[in-house]
Image: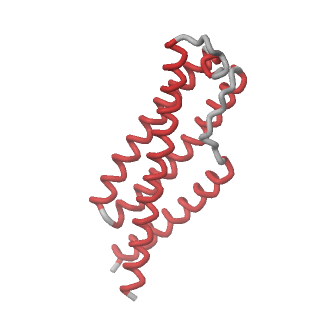
Amino acid sequence: MTKTMDSKNSIKEHEKNLEKLGAELSIIQYNFKIKTEPSEKYWIKKIQEFQDYHKKTLEYFTQGYSLMSLIDEEQSAMFLLRTSKLKKLGAKLLEDMENVKKNPATMNIKDKQQSKWSIEQREKLIKSNNDCLNHEKRMNIFFKDFCENFLQRNQNKK
């Protein structure tokens, strides 16, 4: 009986933490849209915004993993792998943003005489941005589905 109570209390605590982190994330509201802005100032700001957002997102998903591990170890292990992949994708996106920041002219799509290297840098940034965004979307769907199924199972137990 005590273990069940501890588990329920722990789940409630994780839910509160997730709610708080979700509220913080909604305030940050990072925009994944990339402007073809050839200004170093823009890229410095964009990198900082993404770092803040990504750090909070990883914190949120880590908290989600902790909650899931109390309920379903197999599902939580899969979610942990997805969180790890998101971390790697975020690091890749930051690396590509840093490369563009060093040479922001690579984002000038109006320049008809851009080098092959500049075009490749821009394409790498767009790809890593899309990969990160899409992976995060899939994680959100996975976590939402897990939570809905958990709530549904608890409703059926009552």
Residue displayed at 45% across by 50% down: 62
Identify the image quadrant of the N terminus: bottom left
**Is 59 or 144 nearer to us in this picture?**
144
- 142 left or right of 73? right
The image's colour scheme reads: secondary structure
- In this view, the residue in front, 52 or 67, is 52
Determine whether 57 is above or below 41 in the image.
below
x and y percent of residue 138 in the render?
A: 43, 52
For the image, the number of numbered tags is 0
The x, y position of residue 63, in whole percent, is 47, 54
- Residue name at image x 50 percent, y 39 percent: 130
Image side of residue 21 versus residue 86, left or right:
right
Q: Is residue 150 above or below residue 60?
A: below
Q: Is residue 15 above or below residue 84?
A: below
Query: x, y (%) of residue 108?
Result: 65, 20
The correct choice, above or below, for 4 with respect to 116 in the image is below
**Residue closest to the eye, 17 or 40:** 40
